[in-house]
Image (cartoon, rainbow, N blue to C red):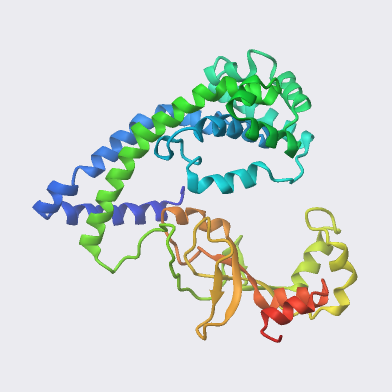
Amino acid sequence: MADKAILAKKQAEEDDFRQKVMANPEWAKEFGGAWDTIAATEKKAAPRTKEMIFRRPDSRLFSIARQIVQYVVEVKKPDGERLPGYHDAQLETLKFQLLSPAKIYPETEKLYMNTALGLAAEKLGKGDEYLKTLTQGENIDGFVNSVIDGTKLADVNFRKSLLEGGEAAVADSTDPMIVAARRTDPLAREYQRWQREEIQSVLIQSGEKLGKARFLVYGKNAYPDATFTLRLSYGTVKGYPYNGTTAPPFTTFYGLYDRAASFSNQPPFDLTPKEASNRDKLDLTTPFDFVSTGDIIGGNSGSPVVNKEGELVGLIFDGNIESLAGDYVYDGSRNRAVAVHSAGMIEGLRKLYGANALADELQGKN
């Protein structure tokens, strides 16, 4: 977003849009105030931006604790009165996540939590209300060690007992992570209420107005932003400028082994045992990944890539670093969608993992 060309493009687009709206008296009356409303709301939100950024313990265990504390309260309310994330349609997914048996590593938790709370103390001050309420004035290192070493939340059965025990079980719990989450829950709820009622509700309403105005001004000549609805993005397989050279449109299995060798097979570039032992079985010229000019956004991972014949040729899993600005503006000279190549998937399934039955099914050979 520090790229002056990108900002100039966005400014030109907004100027054109706004001028066209204001030139039509009817549109100006209905939609013209939206820009000022958004500007005023963003100005109102600015003083609390630091809270949003730094009041985060960055701990999986603490996130679980907070969700459990809120879950047992929210599920007793009518669906329409619950906090976002706790509506009936969301509960199955939430419980699946809360009861996931995925291993949680205490030392990693301590590292993340210490770093996050240290940064909060630096940016918000040690007297920050949230920080004081969370740690009760205790030294950050000591607080982090005590809650992570003392909690039982890494045990799925313990989490399940709290959920099944409901509000009473959570209120009576002496688990230090649950206790910390209970202490900070009123502050978290107040911020969520303020953000929802005083900021997001206004921005959503004004955004809807501008969306309607945009359609009136440009019709079908401009496609909409991502809206969580099914959409198609058209693009070309194409490289892009990269660190003073050009990133190629394809990588191959050759590149996998070259990268590992270039870094002496050290993490994070080390090979798995199967990759190391089965190298001679692979056709190293097989495409592994590829990039295209498709306009994607976060959340598109797993989307199919098809060619003009309608054949599946890959699956999206990322975007290049230059595409991060794609939330705001698309730059076809540098934005690239990154996909794993279907040929690489089949080569790996057959020759690295011995999954011929699965490869046959995918290729319709059953």
Depth order, front residue of 72/236: 72
In which quadrant is the C terminus drawn?
bottom right
Depth order, front residue of 65/344: 65
Depth order, front residue of 238/124: 124
Q: Quadrant of residue 120?
A: top right
Could you say where residue 60 lies in the image, as x and y percent from the top left? 67, 37
- Kindly tell me whether residue 112 is visible in this rendering: no
Depth order, front residue of 143/22: 143
Could you say where residue 234 lies in the image, as x and y percent from the top left? 45, 73
Indicate whether 105 appears above or below 207.
above
Q: Residue at x 79, y 58 (%)?
A: 269
Could you say where residue 141 lies in the image, as x and y percent from the top left? 73, 21
Indicate whether 135 appears above or below 100.
above
Could you say where residue 133 lies in the image, as x and y percent from the top left? 58, 17
Q: Residue at x 44, y 70 (%)?
A: 232
Total tally of numbered discs in the picture: 0
Q: Quadrant of residue 348?
A: bottom right
Query: Which residue is farthest left?
Result: 25
Q: Quadrant of residue 225?
A: bottom left
Q: Horizontal placement of 41 versus 135: left or right?
A: left
Q: Horizontal placement of 53 versus 263: left or right?
A: left
- Kindly tell me whether residue 281 is visible in this rendering: yes
